Image: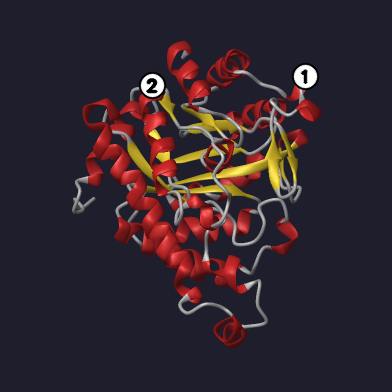
Amino acid sequence: MPRRRDGADVSYERIKEKLARDETVLLDGGIGTEVLRRGVYWRCHGLEQHPEAVRQVHLDYLAAGADVIKTNTFQLNRRAYSNLFHGLEHMRRIGPPGLEHKAAKLTRQAVELARQARHEAGTDSNGAAIAGVISPLEHSFRPDLAPPPDVAEREHRETVEEMKAAGVDFILFESMNTVQEARAGAAAARAAGLPVWVSFVVRESAQLLGGEPIADAAKALDALGVDVVLVNCAPVEDITAALSALAKARSSPIGAYAHIGRYDPPSWKFGFYPRFSGTDAVPPAKYLEAAREWKDLGASVIGGCCGTTPEHIRELRRGL
């Protein structure tokens, strides 16, 4: 792999070496939800008006011991903007100048904030790698809206190239909900010469939201050079069930990261909301118990999804 302008390949090589030694690689936790928890209004992912808050979230995860920090780019793509208009001409007529390029601009800014945080952390970052996060082109909980594979590969390739130019270490397709879109995305990343991980959002019974078994999903990626296959964005118990099935289907590295709380559109609600207290509250110590089970099941990569915090990751670092 050629060395990019910031020596990014060195950080990813460190991750590959940890995986080869069967050591646990620690992902960070929730990014967007943590920005929201800190009182930042979710407009433009908080990137335009409060970039310092996004950078601080990355710094806090690095201080907690994360080996990988994810960019704040979930559901950030050109389609997310174009879907709100009748077409490109309509966007240009009633939208602000340059709106059609806003997703690319924010993507570059998000990657730069992660890079700044790693640089600011210095030796405390332990050479953490930066994962460029790419989500499904439509809503992650609506597999029925997934575009055809050729369209998906073309649009994902656009985002992959933007992230590559901005300096990510590898691509993480996160919360993918169909096998065909996951394959299209992975192909786009490999064509760009970037390492790629794929994580699937799962439901009960070790299935993707579209009903495909997670074991079949993992096998469908075998020929595409995906370094790690993970499961994420589901309650702890569903992640555990899916990981158990994934471990039986794949001999290469696997991983897991669960969400906590409840989704009450347009945002997540967590344990500190009285309406969702009790069993929906998963404090760091309880999350660690689940993570230890994931490790016993064979997970090499463990982290947190929506609602988890730097405190959760710090507890994983201490306990794993």
- Residue 23 tag number: 2
Q: Name the residue under label 1.
A: 278
- Name the one closer to the observer, 317 or 192: 317
For label 1, the crowd category at 10 Å Cα-Cα, with few meaning under 14, some 14 to 19 and many 20 or more, is few
Reply above or below: 43 against 233: below
**Residue 157: x and y, percent?**
44, 66
Residue 86 horizontal side relative to residue 68, left or right: right
Give x and y (percent) for residue 222.
50, 47
Q: Which residue is drawn at 58% across and 13% down?
A: 285
| Relative horizontal placement of residue 121, taking residue 183 as reference (left or right) | left
* Vertical position of residue 191 compared to residue 197: above or below: below
1 or 2: tag closer to the N-terminus: 2
- Check disc 1 and give the amino acid type: Gly
Q: Residue at x 39, y 44 (%)?
A: 52
Q: What element carries label 1?
A: helix
- Circles 1 and 2 in contact, beta carbons < 8 Å: no
Residue 191 visible in the shown view: no
What sort of colour scheme is used for the picture? secondary structure
> Which residue: 40% across, 30% down?
60
In the image, is 170 to the left or to the right of 43? left
Q: Where is residue 137 in the image (x, y as percent from the top left)?
A: 59, 62
Q: Is residue 226 above or below residue 257?
A: below
Q: Look at the numbered disc 2 and give the secondary structure of its residue.
A: loop
**Percent of width and height locating residue 149:** 59, 67
Q: Look at 61% across and 59% down and name the residue there.
A: 180
Q: How crowded is mark 2: few (under 14 residues within 10 Å), some or many (20 or more)?
A: some
Q: Which mark is residue 230?
A: none
Residue farthest right in this picture: 275
Which numbered mark, 1 or 2, is in the foreground of this view?
1
- Asked whether residue 26 is in view, the answer is yes
User: What's the CA distance linking mark 1 and mark 2?
Assistant: 33 Å
Disc 2 residue type (three-letter): Glu
